Amino acid sequence: MTTEQVQQNSRGRINDAVGTVISDKMDKTISVKIYRLVKHARYNKYIRKTSVFKAHDEKNEAKIGDKVRIHETRPMSKTKRWKLAEVMEKGGLVDREVSKS
């Protein structure tokens, strides 16, 4: 069975989102910033809103600046309800460590 068939046969559709890692300082946890467009009720203009989700990263593979896909899962802690599905592309941010010369 493919993953699409498993998702349809089990408990329904799995929510997933694509965002950018903004913090990886915690052990096995990343913070992911997600952008979404919301239409203003009165002015009919689209406004870009952001949300930050904490996601479980078992192998600590995602780094700051990476574009990642996360999916919703059971509560793992007080604030962590998402899990890292894949790292889509590596970010261009360089390590901030300053070499002592």
Image: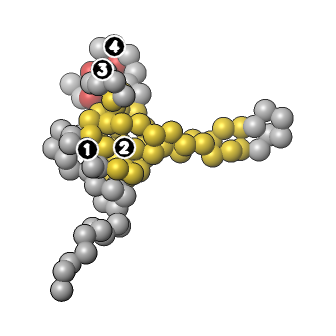
Q: Nearer the viewer, residue 8 or 52?
A: 52
The residue carrying mark 1 is 26
Looking at this rendering, what residue extends furthest in the right direction? 42
Looking at the rendered structure, the secondary structure element under dot 3 is loop
Give the label, 4 or 1, closer to the camera: 1
Q: Position of residue 7 (x, y in %)?
A: 32, 22
Q: Earlier in the sequence, mark 2 or mark 1?
A: 1
Q: In which quadrant of the rendered image does the N terminus lie?
A: top left
**Residue kind at label 3, given as amino acid type:** Arg
- What is the CA distance from the residue labelled 4 to the residue labelled 3? 13 Å
The residue carrying mark 3 is 74
Give the label, 2 or 4, closer to the camera: 2
Q: Horizontally, is 67 left or right of 24 in the view?
A: right
> Which disc is residue 16 wearing?
none
Q: Residues within 10 Å of mark 2 (few under 14, many from 20)?
A: many
The residue at the point 51 percent across, 39 percent down is 51
The residue at the point 18 percent across, 86 percent down is 101
Q: Earlier in the sequence, mark 2 or mark 4?
A: 4
The residue at the point 63 percent across, 46 percent down is 48
Looking at this rendering, what residue extends furthest in the bottom direction? 101
The residue carrying mark 4 is 11
- What is the CA distance from the residue labelled 1 to the residue labelled 3? 19 Å
Q: Are marks 2 and 1 in contact (CB under 8 Å)?
A: yes
